[in-house]
Image: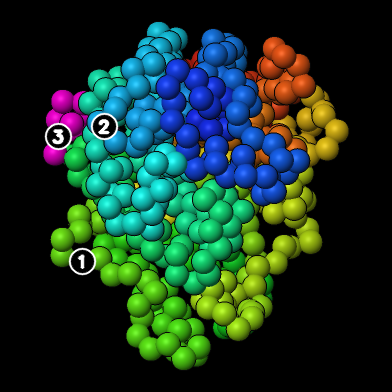
Amino acid sequence: MFPRDFAWGAGTSAYQIEGGWQADGKGPSIWDTFCHEKGGIFGNQNGDVTCNSYELWEKDLECIQQLGLTHYRLSLSWARLLPDGTTRNVNQKGVQYYNRVIDDLLACNVSPMVTLYHFDLPQAIQNLGGWKSPGVATLFDSYSKFCFQTFGDRVKLWITINEPHVCARLGHEVGIHAPGLKEKGTAAYLVGHNMLRAHAMAWHSYNSEYRATQKGAVSLALNSDWFEPLDPLRHEDVASAERDLAFTLGWFAWPVFITGDYPELMRSAIETQSKMMGYSGNWRLPRFLKEDPPILGTADFFALNYYTSRKVKSGGCCGQMLSMKRDLDAEEVLDPSWPISGMSWLAVVPHGLRKLLKYIKDVFNNPTIYITENGFAQVGPLQIEDVERCKFYRSTISEVVKAIEEDGVNVRGYFAWSLMDNFEWADGFSVRFGLFHVDFSGAELSRTIYQSGREYSKIISKYKSAQSGCQGFLDDDY
Ligand code: PNW
Protein backbone atom coordinates (compact mmCIF):
# COMPACT_ATOMS: atom_id res chain seq x y z
CA MET A 1 0.00 0.00 0.00
CA PHE A 2 1.18 3.53 -0.65
CA PRO A 3 1.74 5.94 2.22
CA ARG A 4 -1.03 8.46 2.72
CA ASP A 5 0.93 11.42 1.41
CA PHE A 6 2.37 9.54 -1.58
CA ALA A 7 3.23 11.87 -4.48
CA TRP A 8 1.62 10.92 -7.79
CA GLY A 9 3.30 13.01 -10.42
CA ALA A 10 4.44 13.49 -13.96
CA GLY A 11 7.47 15.40 -15.20
CA THR A 12 8.71 17.69 -17.94
CA SER A 13 11.73 19.94 -18.42
CA ALA A 14 12.04 23.51 -19.62
CA TYR A 15 13.94 23.07 -22.88
CA GLN A 16 11.86 20.06 -23.84
CA ILE A 17 8.47 21.82 -23.58
CA GLU A 18 8.67 25.60 -23.29
CA GLY A 19 9.68 26.91 -26.69
CA GLY A 20 9.84 30.72 -26.63
CA TRP A 21 13.58 30.37 -26.95
CA GLN A 22 14.04 34.09 -27.53
CA ALA A 23 10.80 35.36 -26.00
CA ASP A 24 10.72 38.31 -23.60
CA GLY A 25 14.43 38.60 -23.00
CA LYS A 26 15.41 34.96 -22.48
CA GLY A 27 19.10 34.32 -23.06
CA PRO A 28 20.35 31.42 -25.20
CA SER A 29 21.23 28.10 -23.59
CA ILE A 30 23.68 25.46 -24.76
CA TRP A 31 20.75 23.47 -26.16
CA ASP A 32 19.70 26.41 -28.35
CA THR A 33 23.23 26.57 -29.69
CA PHE A 34 23.66 22.82 -30.05
CA CYS A 35 20.41 22.40 -32.02
CA HIS A 36 21.04 25.38 -34.25
CA GLU A 37 24.44 24.06 -35.25
CA LYS A 38 22.93 21.52 -37.61
CA GLY A 39 23.89 17.91 -37.66
CA GLY A 40 23.53 16.54 -34.18
CA ILE A 41 19.79 16.12 -33.77
CA PHE A 42 17.31 13.84 -35.51
CA GLY A 43 15.98 15.68 -38.58
CA ASN A 44 17.83 18.84 -37.53
CA GLN A 45 14.94 19.52 -35.17
CA ASN A 46 15.15 21.87 -32.18
CA GLY A 47 13.26 23.13 -29.13
CA ASP A 48 12.56 26.62 -30.52
CA VAL A 49 8.82 26.03 -30.26
CA THR A 50 8.23 22.41 -29.16
CA CYS A 51 5.02 22.28 -26.99
CA ASN A 52 5.12 26.09 -26.62
CA SER A 53 4.37 25.77 -22.94
CA TYR A 54 5.70 29.29 -22.51
CA GLU A 55 2.45 30.46 -24.13
CA LEU A 56 0.22 27.45 -23.62
CA TRP A 57 0.76 26.77 -19.93
CA GLU A 58 -3.02 26.63 -19.29
CA LYS A 59 -3.23 23.66 -21.64
CA ASP A 60 -0.60 21.84 -19.60
CA LEU A 61 -2.47 22.63 -16.42
CA GLU A 62 -5.63 21.11 -17.91
CA CYS A 63 -3.67 17.91 -18.64
CA ILE A 64 -2.32 17.84 -15.09
CA GLN A 65 -5.82 18.21 -13.68
CA GLN A 66 -7.28 15.63 -16.02
CA LEU A 67 -4.79 13.08 -14.70
CA GLY A 68 -5.53 13.93 -11.07
CA LEU A 69 -1.83 14.40 -10.22
CA THR A 70 -0.89 15.44 -6.71
CA HIS A 71 2.54 16.67 -7.92
CA TYR A 72 4.02 18.12 -11.09
CA ARG A 73 7.78 18.12 -11.76
CA LEU A 74 9.02 20.94 -13.96
CA SER A 75 12.39 22.59 -14.49
CA LEU A 76 13.31 26.26 -14.59
CA SER A 77 15.25 27.62 -17.52
CA TRP A 78 18.29 29.32 -15.97
CA ALA A 79 18.72 31.50 -19.07
CA ARG A 80 15.07 32.57 -19.02
CA LEU A 81 15.47 33.84 -15.47
CA LEU A 82 19.08 35.07 -15.72
CA PRO A 83 19.84 35.64 -19.42
CA ASP A 84 23.63 35.85 -18.96
CA GLY A 85 23.63 33.31 -16.15
CA THR A 86 24.39 35.81 -13.39
CA THR A 87 22.09 37.55 -10.93
CA ARG A 88 23.33 40.88 -12.29
CA ASN A 89 20.46 40.82 -14.82
CA VAL A 90 17.14 39.34 -13.79
CA ASN A 91 14.54 38.81 -16.50
CA GLN A 92 11.30 39.77 -14.74
CA LYS A 93 9.19 38.21 -17.50
CA GLY A 94 10.79 34.89 -16.73
CA VAL A 95 10.07 35.34 -13.03
CA GLN A 96 6.44 36.18 -13.85
CA TYR A 97 6.10 33.09 -16.01
CA TYR A 98 7.25 30.69 -13.32
CA ASN A 99 5.32 32.53 -10.61
CA ARG A 100 2.19 31.98 -12.60
CA VAL A 101 2.92 28.29 -13.16
CA ILE A 102 3.62 27.72 -9.47
CA ASP A 103 0.60 29.74 -8.29
CA ASP A 104 -1.74 27.99 -10.73
CA LEU A 105 -0.50 24.58 -9.61
CA LEU A 106 -1.03 25.41 -5.95
CA ALA A 107 -4.47 26.86 -6.68
CA CYS A 108 -5.35 23.45 -8.18
CA ASN A 109 -3.94 21.62 -5.17
CA VAL A 110 -0.94 20.29 -7.10
CA SER A 111 2.49 20.55 -5.47
CA PRO A 112 5.40 21.58 -7.68
CA MET A 113 8.68 19.70 -7.63
CA VAL A 114 11.15 22.08 -9.23
CA THR A 115 14.42 21.16 -10.92
CA LEU A 116 16.91 24.01 -11.15
CA TYR A 117 19.06 22.48 -13.87
CA HIS A 118 17.88 20.07 -16.53
CA PHE A 119 20.65 20.08 -19.19
CA ASP A 120 20.24 23.73 -20.31
CA LEU A 121 23.24 25.79 -19.20
CA PRO A 122 23.16 29.48 -20.19
CA GLN A 123 25.39 29.84 -23.25
CA ALA A 124 27.12 32.78 -21.55
CA ILE A 125 28.45 30.38 -18.91
CA GLN A 126 29.48 27.83 -21.51
CA ASN A 127 31.52 30.60 -23.09
CA LEU A 128 33.47 30.81 -19.83
CA GLY A 129 34.23 27.10 -19.86
CA GLY A 130 30.87 25.69 -18.75
CA TRP A 131 30.79 22.78 -16.33
CA LYS A 132 34.47 22.09 -16.89
CA SER A 133 35.29 25.30 -15.12
CA PRO A 134 35.38 25.17 -11.30
CA GLY A 135 33.83 28.65 -11.09
CA VAL A 136 30.54 27.37 -12.44
CA ALA A 137 29.71 26.01 -8.98
CA THR A 138 29.59 29.51 -7.51
CA LEU A 139 27.42 30.74 -10.36
CA PHE A 140 25.06 27.81 -9.86
CA ASP A 141 24.91 28.56 -6.15
CA SER A 142 23.93 32.19 -6.81
CA TYR A 143 21.29 31.08 -9.31
CA SER A 144 19.95 28.53 -6.78
CA LYS A 145 19.77 31.10 -4.00
CA PHE A 146 17.94 33.43 -6.34
CA CYS A 147 15.38 30.67 -7.02
CA PHE A 148 14.99 29.69 -3.35
CA GLN A 149 14.51 33.36 -2.50
CA THR A 150 12.01 33.97 -5.32
CA PHE A 151 9.97 30.76 -5.38
CA GLY A 152 10.83 28.90 -2.16
CA ASP A 153 7.92 30.36 -0.21
CA ARG A 154 5.75 28.06 -2.38
CA VAL A 155 8.08 25.32 -3.69
CA LYS A 156 8.88 22.63 -1.10
CA LEU A 157 10.58 19.99 -3.23
CA TRP A 158 13.74 20.96 -5.07
CA ILE A 159 16.06 19.08 -7.40
CA THR A 160 19.31 20.93 -7.97
CA ILE A 161 20.70 19.03 -10.96
CA ASN A 162 19.01 16.43 -13.12
CA GLU A 163 21.11 13.43 -14.13
CA PRO A 164 24.66 14.71 -13.73
CA HIS A 165 25.76 11.39 -15.23
CA VAL A 166 23.95 12.07 -18.52
CA CYS A 167 25.14 15.71 -18.69
CA ALA A 168 28.72 14.71 -18.01
CA ARG A 169 28.96 11.66 -20.23
CA LEU A 170 26.65 12.43 -23.15
CA GLY A 171 27.53 16.13 -23.20
CA HIS A 172 31.29 15.97 -22.70
CA GLU A 173 32.53 12.47 -23.54
CA VAL A 174 30.14 11.02 -26.12
CA GLY A 175 29.08 14.39 -27.51
CA ILE A 176 25.48 13.63 -28.50
CA HIS A 177 24.10 16.14 -25.97
CA ALA A 178 25.00 19.83 -25.61
CA PRO A 179 27.63 21.17 -25.49
CA GLY A 180 28.68 18.32 -27.80
CA LEU A 181 32.23 17.76 -26.53
CA LYS A 182 33.98 14.48 -27.26
CA GLU A 183 36.84 14.68 -24.79
CA LYS A 184 37.31 11.08 -23.88
CA GLY A 185 38.47 9.98 -20.48
CA THR A 186 38.79 13.29 -18.65
CA ALA A 187 36.11 15.91 -19.25
CA ALA A 188 33.16 13.86 -17.97
CA TYR A 189 34.87 13.27 -14.62
CA LEU A 190 35.69 16.94 -14.28
CA VAL A 191 32.13 17.95 -15.18
CA GLY A 192 30.67 15.42 -12.73
CA HIS A 193 32.99 16.80 -10.07
CA ASN A 194 31.94 20.39 -10.61
CA MET A 195 28.29 19.36 -10.68
CA LEU A 196 28.70 17.70 -7.29
CA ARG A 197 30.44 20.81 -5.94
CA ALA A 198 27.67 23.01 -7.39
CA HIS A 199 24.93 20.80 -5.96
CA ALA A 200 26.57 20.73 -2.54
CA MET A 201 26.99 24.51 -2.43
CA ALA A 202 23.31 24.98 -3.28
CA TRP A 203 22.22 22.44 -0.66
CA HIS A 204 24.33 24.16 2.00
CA SER A 205 22.88 27.53 1.02
CA TYR A 206 19.36 26.16 1.36
CA ASN A 207 20.23 24.50 4.62
CA SER A 208 21.69 27.55 6.27
CA GLU A 209 19.64 30.36 4.74
CA TYR A 210 16.23 29.01 3.71
CA ARG A 211 15.38 25.73 5.39
CA ALA A 212 14.24 27.21 8.69
CA THR A 213 11.67 29.49 7.06
CA GLN A 214 10.77 27.56 3.92
CA LYS A 215 10.83 24.02 5.34
CA GLY A 216 11.43 22.30 2.02
CA ALA A 217 13.69 19.46 0.88
CA VAL A 218 16.53 19.45 -1.63
CA SER A 219 18.22 16.65 -3.56
CA LEU A 220 19.70 15.83 -6.96
CA ALA A 221 18.15 13.40 -9.45
CA LEU A 222 20.32 10.40 -10.28
CA ASN A 223 19.70 8.12 -13.21
CA SER A 224 20.63 4.49 -13.14
CA ASP A 225 19.74 1.31 -14.92
CA TRP A 226 19.59 -1.86 -12.86
CA PHE A 227 22.71 -3.90 -13.66
CA GLU A 228 23.03 -7.57 -12.95
CA PRO A 229 25.67 -10.14 -13.90
CA LEU A 230 25.01 -12.04 -17.12
CA ASP A 231 26.23 -15.18 -15.41
CA PRO A 232 25.79 -14.82 -11.64
CA LEU A 233 28.20 -17.72 -11.13
CA ARG A 234 31.03 -16.04 -13.00
CA HIS A 235 33.14 -13.90 -10.74
CA GLU A 236 34.13 -11.54 -13.60
CA ASP A 237 30.51 -10.86 -14.51
CA VAL A 238 29.57 -10.18 -10.89
CA ALA A 239 32.47 -7.74 -10.57
CA SER A 240 31.53 -6.07 -13.86
CA ALA A 241 27.95 -5.50 -12.75
CA GLU A 242 29.20 -4.01 -9.47
CA ARG A 243 31.53 -1.73 -11.40
CA ASP A 244 28.68 -0.60 -13.63
CA LEU A 245 26.57 0.31 -10.61
CA ALA A 246 29.54 2.15 -9.12
CA PHE A 247 30.23 4.13 -12.31
CA THR A 248 26.58 5.00 -12.89
CA LEU A 249 24.76 5.46 -9.59
CA GLY A 250 27.73 5.25 -7.23
CA TRP A 251 29.63 8.05 -8.98
CA PHE A 252 27.21 10.57 -7.45
CA ALA A 253 25.42 8.61 -4.75
CA TRP A 254 28.51 7.52 -2.79
CA PRO A 255 29.81 11.04 -2.27
CA VAL A 256 26.39 12.38 -1.31
CA PHE A 257 25.00 9.46 0.75
CA ILE A 258 27.90 7.41 2.09
CA THR A 259 31.45 8.70 2.15
CA GLY A 260 31.82 12.20 0.73
CA ASP A 261 34.06 10.71 -1.96
CA TYR A 262 33.80 8.56 -5.08
CA PRO A 263 33.43 4.78 -4.76
CA GLU A 264 36.74 3.04 -4.24
CA LEU A 265 35.83 0.68 -7.08
CA MET A 266 35.68 3.62 -9.44
CA ARG A 267 38.98 5.13 -8.32
CA SER A 268 40.79 1.82 -8.62
CA ALA A 269 39.32 0.98 -12.05
CA ILE A 270 40.36 4.37 -13.42
CA GLU A 271 43.81 4.03 -11.94
CA THR A 272 44.26 0.55 -13.43
CA GLN A 273 43.36 1.72 -16.92
CA SER A 274 45.50 4.85 -16.62
CA LYS A 275 48.50 2.74 -15.69
CA MET A 276 47.86 0.29 -18.51
CA MET A 277 47.98 3.19 -20.92
CA GLY A 278 51.23 4.44 -19.49
CA TYR A 279 49.92 7.19 -17.23
CA SER A 280 50.79 7.04 -13.59
CA GLY A 281 48.72 8.24 -10.66
CA ASN A 282 45.03 8.90 -10.54
CA TRP A 283 44.74 12.42 -11.88
CA ARG A 284 41.72 11.87 -14.09
CA LEU A 285 39.16 11.52 -11.30
CA PRO A 286 39.50 14.71 -9.26
CA ARG A 287 39.73 14.78 -5.48
CA PHE A 288 37.59 16.96 -3.27
CA LEU A 289 39.63 19.64 -1.58
CA LYS A 290 39.43 21.15 1.88
CA GLU A 291 38.03 24.35 0.44
CA ASP A 292 35.24 22.49 -1.37
CA PRO A 293 31.82 22.35 0.29
CA PRO A 294 31.37 19.05 2.15
CA ILE A 295 29.50 16.69 -0.16
CA LEU A 296 28.39 14.07 2.34
CA GLY A 297 24.85 14.51 3.58
CA THR A 298 23.76 16.99 0.94
CA ALA A 299 20.48 15.30 0.03
CA ASP A 300 17.22 15.34 1.97
CA PHE A 301 15.84 12.43 -0.06
CA PHE A 302 16.98 10.10 -2.83
CA ALA A 303 15.66 11.07 -6.30
CA LEU A 304 15.91 8.25 -8.82
CA ASN A 305 15.32 8.26 -12.57
CA TYR A 306 14.90 4.68 -13.71
CA TYR A 307 14.20 3.54 -17.26
CA THR A 308 15.73 0.16 -17.96
CA SER A 309 18.07 -2.72 -17.01
CA ARG A 310 21.16 -4.41 -18.39
CA LYS A 311 22.95 -7.72 -18.02
CA VAL A 312 26.66 -7.17 -17.66
CA LYS A 313 29.67 -9.29 -18.57
CA SER A 314 33.36 -8.62 -18.37
CA GLY A 315 35.41 -7.12 -21.16
CA GLY A 316 34.08 -5.47 -24.27
CA CYS A 317 36.62 -2.68 -24.38
CA CYS A 318 38.05 -1.15 -26.55
CA GLY A 319 40.48 0.89 -28.58
CA GLN A 320 43.78 2.51 -27.74
CA MET A 321 42.43 5.57 -26.00
CA LEU A 322 41.53 6.31 -22.43
CA SER A 323 37.78 6.63 -22.09
CA MET A 324 35.04 6.12 -19.54
CA LYS A 325 34.01 3.01 -21.38
CA ARG A 326 37.50 1.65 -21.06
CA ASP A 327 37.62 2.50 -17.34
CA LEU A 328 34.33 0.69 -16.85
CA ASP A 329 35.66 -2.39 -18.60
CA ALA A 330 32.28 -4.08 -18.80
CA GLU A 331 29.96 -5.02 -21.59
CA GLU A 332 26.24 -4.43 -21.28
CA VAL A 333 23.82 -6.74 -23.06
CA LEU A 334 20.07 -7.17 -23.20
CA ASP A 335 18.27 -10.23 -22.02
CA PRO A 336 16.40 -11.58 -25.06
CA SER A 337 13.30 -12.07 -22.93
CA TRP A 338 12.96 -8.32 -22.26
CA PRO A 339 10.60 -6.53 -24.66
CA ILE A 340 11.96 -3.36 -26.27
CA SER A 341 9.91 -0.16 -26.16
CA GLY A 342 10.20 2.15 -29.14
CA MET A 343 13.85 2.97 -28.49
CA SER A 344 16.59 0.40 -28.79
CA TRP A 345 18.12 1.28 -25.39
CA LEU A 346 14.84 1.10 -23.58
CA ALA A 347 14.15 -2.53 -22.72
CA VAL A 348 11.05 -2.86 -20.59
CA VAL A 349 12.12 -4.33 -17.24
CA PRO A 350 9.74 -3.27 -14.47
CA HIS A 351 11.17 -5.77 -11.97
CA GLY A 352 14.58 -4.10 -12.40
CA LEU A 353 13.11 -1.06 -10.66
CA ARG A 354 12.16 -3.16 -7.63
CA LYS A 355 15.69 -4.59 -7.45
CA LEU A 356 17.27 -1.17 -7.80
CA LEU A 357 15.03 0.26 -5.06
CA LYS A 358 16.05 -2.56 -2.72
CA TYR A 359 19.71 -1.99 -3.59
CA ILE A 360 19.36 1.73 -2.77
CA LYS A 361 17.69 0.89 0.52
CA ASP A 362 20.49 -1.49 1.48
CA VAL A 363 23.50 0.45 0.23
CA PHE A 364 22.51 4.06 0.86
CA ASN A 365 21.10 3.72 4.39
CA ASN A 366 17.41 3.37 3.72
CA PRO A 367 16.68 6.86 2.40
CA THR A 368 13.29 8.30 1.51
CA ILE A 369 13.04 7.75 -2.23
CA TYR A 370 11.16 9.64 -4.91
CA ILE A 371 11.10 7.98 -8.34
CA THR A 372 11.49 11.24 -10.23
CA GLU A 373 11.36 9.73 -13.73
CA ASN A 374 10.16 6.50 -15.30
CA GLY A 375 8.51 6.03 -18.64
CA PHE A 376 8.01 4.26 -21.91
CA ALA A 377 8.75 5.57 -25.40
CA GLN A 378 6.66 5.27 -28.50
CA VAL A 379 8.35 5.45 -31.89
CA GLY A 380 6.83 5.13 -35.34
CA PRO A 381 3.14 5.25 -36.23
CA LEU A 382 1.09 7.09 -33.69
CA GLN A 383 -1.10 4.99 -31.44
CA ILE A 384 -3.48 6.80 -29.14
CA GLU A 385 -4.57 3.36 -27.91
CA ASP A 386 -1.11 2.62 -26.58
CA VAL A 387 -1.83 -0.72 -25.02
CA GLU A 388 1.83 -1.60 -24.42
CA ARG A 389 2.45 1.56 -22.45
CA CYS A 390 -0.68 0.89 -20.35
CA LYS A 391 0.75 -2.51 -19.48
CA PHE A 392 4.10 -0.91 -18.73
CA TYR A 393 2.66 1.53 -16.18
CA ARG A 394 0.52 -1.16 -14.55
CA SER A 395 3.38 -3.58 -14.09
CA THR A 396 5.90 -0.92 -13.06
CA ILE A 397 3.63 0.47 -10.37
CA SER A 398 2.92 -3.02 -9.09
CA GLU A 399 6.70 -3.50 -8.72
CA VAL A 400 6.80 -0.30 -6.67
CA VAL A 401 4.06 -1.71 -4.46
CA LYS A 402 6.13 -4.86 -3.91
CA ALA A 403 9.20 -2.78 -3.09
CA ILE A 404 7.23 -0.92 -0.45
CA GLU A 405 5.26 -3.82 1.00
CA GLU A 406 7.63 -6.76 0.71
CA ASP A 407 11.05 -5.12 0.75
CA GLY A 408 10.21 -2.27 3.10
CA VAL A 409 11.65 0.38 0.79
CA ASN A 410 10.66 3.90 1.76
CA VAL A 411 9.24 5.14 -1.57
CA ARG A 412 7.44 8.44 -1.22
CA GLY A 413 6.51 9.33 -4.78
CA TYR A 414 6.36 8.29 -8.41
CA PHE A 415 6.67 10.66 -11.37
CA ALA A 416 5.84 9.38 -14.83
CA TRP A 417 7.99 10.71 -17.66
CA SER A 418 6.44 12.59 -19.28
CA LEU A 419 3.28 14.65 -18.92
CA MET A 420 3.22 15.08 -22.70
CA ASP A 421 5.19 14.32 -25.85
CA ASN A 422 8.10 16.73 -26.15
CA PHE A 423 11.54 17.40 -27.60
CA GLU A 424 13.47 14.23 -26.77
CA TRP A 425 17.02 15.66 -27.00
CA ALA A 426 19.12 14.01 -29.74
CA ASP A 427 16.04 12.09 -30.91
CA GLY A 428 14.05 15.27 -31.53
CA PHE A 429 10.34 14.61 -31.91
CA SER A 430 10.79 11.08 -33.24
CA VAL A 431 10.29 9.58 -29.80
CA ARG A 432 7.13 10.12 -27.76
CA PHE A 433 7.18 9.69 -23.98
CA GLY A 434 3.93 11.54 -23.20
CA LEU A 435 0.81 10.62 -21.30
CA PHE A 436 -0.67 13.19 -23.66
CA HIS A 437 -0.08 13.27 -27.38
CA VAL A 438 1.01 16.64 -28.77
CA ASP A 439 0.19 17.42 -32.38
CA PHE A 440 3.46 19.06 -33.47
CA SER A 441 2.23 19.41 -37.05
CA GLY A 442 -0.72 21.63 -36.12
CA ALA A 443 -0.43 25.30 -35.21
CA GLU A 444 -2.45 24.73 -32.04
CA LEU A 445 -0.13 22.05 -30.69
CA SER A 446 -3.20 20.38 -29.27
CA ARG A 447 -2.82 17.90 -26.42
CA THR A 448 -4.83 14.65 -26.53
CA ILE A 449 -4.78 12.08 -23.78
CA TYR A 450 -3.35 8.65 -24.65
CA GLN A 451 -5.00 5.54 -23.33
CA SER A 452 -1.98 5.26 -21.03
CA GLY A 453 -2.85 8.69 -19.63
CA ARG A 454 -6.33 7.41 -18.77
CA GLU A 455 -4.80 4.28 -17.30
CA TYR A 456 -2.37 6.24 -15.10
CA SER A 457 -5.18 8.47 -13.98
CA LYS A 458 -7.28 5.42 -13.02
CA ILE A 459 -4.38 3.96 -11.06
CA ILE A 460 -3.93 7.24 -9.21
CA SER A 461 -7.58 7.60 -8.28
CA LYS A 462 -7.80 3.99 -7.22
CA TYR A 463 -4.89 4.31 -4.81
CA LYS A 464 -6.03 7.70 -3.60
CA SER A 465 -9.45 6.38 -2.70
CA ALA A 466 -7.90 3.33 -1.04
CA GLN A 467 -5.74 5.65 1.03
CA SER A 468 -8.72 7.64 2.16
CA GLY A 469 -10.45 4.47 3.27
CA CYS A 470 -12.90 3.95 0.39
CA GLN A 471 -13.60 0.54 -1.02
CA GLY A 472 -12.06 0.98 -4.44
CA PHE A 473 -8.86 -0.75 -3.47
CA LEU A 474 -10.51 -4.07 -2.68
CA ASP A 475 -11.17 -5.08 -6.26
CA ASP A 476 -7.66 -4.02 -7.10
CA ASP A 477 -6.23 -5.70 -10.17
CA TYR A 478 -2.87 -3.94 -10.36
C1 PNW B 1 16.31 11.52 -19.20
N1 PNW B 1 20.28 8.19 -23.05
O1 PNW B 1 17.40 11.70 -20.04
C2 PNW B 1 15.94 12.94 -18.98
O2 PNW B 1 15.99 13.39 -17.66
C3 PNW B 1 14.73 13.37 -19.73
O3 PNW B 1 14.87 14.73 -20.03
C4 PNW B 1 14.53 12.52 -20.96
O4 PNW B 1 13.49 12.99 -21.76
C5 PNW B 1 14.29 11.11 -20.48
O5 PNW B 1 15.37 10.64 -19.72
C6 PNW B 1 14.02 10.10 -21.57
O6 PNW B 1 15.15 9.88 -22.36
C7 PNW B 1 18.06 10.78 -20.76
O7 PNW B 1 20.48 8.47 -24.27
C8 PNW B 1 18.38 11.10 -22.06
O8 PNW B 1 20.78 7.17 -22.52
C9 PNW B 1 19.11 10.25 -22.81
C10 PNW B 1 19.54 9.04 -22.26
C11 PNW B 1 19.21 8.71 -20.96
C12 PNW B 1 18.47 9.59 -20.20
Horizontal side of residue 203 vs 440, given as left or right: left
Placement of 121 over or under 449, stated as above or below:
below
Residue annotated with mark 1:
289
Does the rendering let one see residue 328? Answer: no
Placement of 250 over or under 342, stated as above or below:
below
Q: Secondary structure at mark 3?
A: helix
Question: Do tag 1 and tag 3 residues touch (Cβ < 8 Å)?
Answer: no
Asked whether 209 falls inside the magenta stretch, the response is: yes
The residue lying at 50 percent from left, 88 percent from top is 277
Q: Secondary structure at mark 2?
A: loop
Horizontal side of residue 276 vs 231, given as left or right: left
Residue annotated with mark 3:
209
Residue 87's mark? Answer: 2
Q: Quick one: quadrant of the C terminus?
A: top right
Placement of 57 over or under 272, stated as above or below:
above
Foreground label between 1 and 2: 2
Magenta: main secondary structure equals helix
Residue type of the residue flagged with mark 2: Thr
- The region drawn magenta spans 208-217
